[in-house]
Image (cartoon, grey):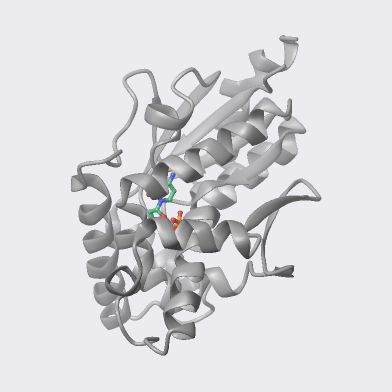
Amino acid sequence: MRGRVVAIDGPSASGKSSTARAVAEELGFAHLDSGALYRGVTLVALREAARRGRAHEDPLDVLEPEAILRAAEDRGLMLQPDGAGFAAYLEGEPVDTEIRAGRVTGSVSAVSAVPVVREWINSRLRAMVRAGRDVVVDGRDIGTVVFPDADLKVFLTASPVVRAGRRITQRGVDPDPQRLEAEAAALAARDHADSTRPTAPLRPADDAVLLDTTSLAFREQVARIVELARPLLARR
Ligand code: DC
């Protein structure tokens, strides 16, 4: 039997992952971070390029997408159930820190624009839900493409400056005006790349609930989504 699905989509640094994790905890669902798989495939691509002595090139110039996906399978890229969520593994080692490092972040938009990469990841996400787990899944196209029949769809937004401030504070540094401006520009570039790509662009599903978190505190945004999801708990 398929598990219940809450889909949370939105742009970079809109707080999707931390919100999805907190909502999952409240509901007793597992949190599935689809971006972790995109980042995992990107890490595979970077490592394979390095194995070929071409670490400093764009990995998509070094390898065909099919070769990257074959390497992902051969080297055991996977999300394994871990507490209330899933942890990313590659070559038998946890890679949750490495997939969030700058090198991966710099290449992930290009890798995630490749249609066969998206199909490969989507089939893995669907298999995890077919296994019967109730999940809160966060990403860019969860409500539009991966789970168009999700039980609840939420699209989070926040102004670029607020998102930039949250991202900088997360890193534990001072969000001074220069850093804010640079980070907001980097986020805007990534938003643009993610929302104008031909395959599965970032956009809200027609039946998604839009939640602008610009002036919401974290616990308020979690509470709103939990409230929207509460009727699901009675189902089953
Ligand atoms: O949410 P994140 O920053 O970890 O996502 C990393 C990248 O993966 C982001 O640039 C867009 C891509 N992504 C995607 O295209 N579709 C998803 N469902 C999730 C992430």
Q: In percent of the image, x 45 and y 63: which residue is there?
A: 166
Query: Residue 199 falls in which quadrant of the image?
Result: top left
Residue 74 x, y percent position in the rendering: 61, 61
Q: In percent of the image, x 42 and y 40: which residue is there?
A: 119
Residue 82 x, y percent position in the rendering: 78, 52
Residue 28 x, y percent position in the rendering: 77, 33
- Taking 187 as reference, is 16 left or right? right
Q: In percent of the image, x 65 and y 22: which residue is there?
A: 4
| Frontmost residue, 105 versus 222 | 105
- Taking 228 as reference, is 2 left or right? right
| Frontmost residue, 179 versus 38 | 38
Q: Residue furthest right?
A: 83
Q: Can residue 208 be seen from the camera position used here?
A: yes
Q: In percent of the image, x 71 and y 9: which residue is there?
A: 235
Q: Quadrant of the N terminus?
A: top right
- Taking 87 as reference, is 218 left or right? left
Q: How many marks?
A: 0
Q: Can residue 213 be seen from the camera position used here?
A: no
Q: Quadrant of the C terminus?
A: top right
Query: Residue 97 falls in which quadrant of the image?
Result: bottom right
Q: Residue furthest top?
A: 235
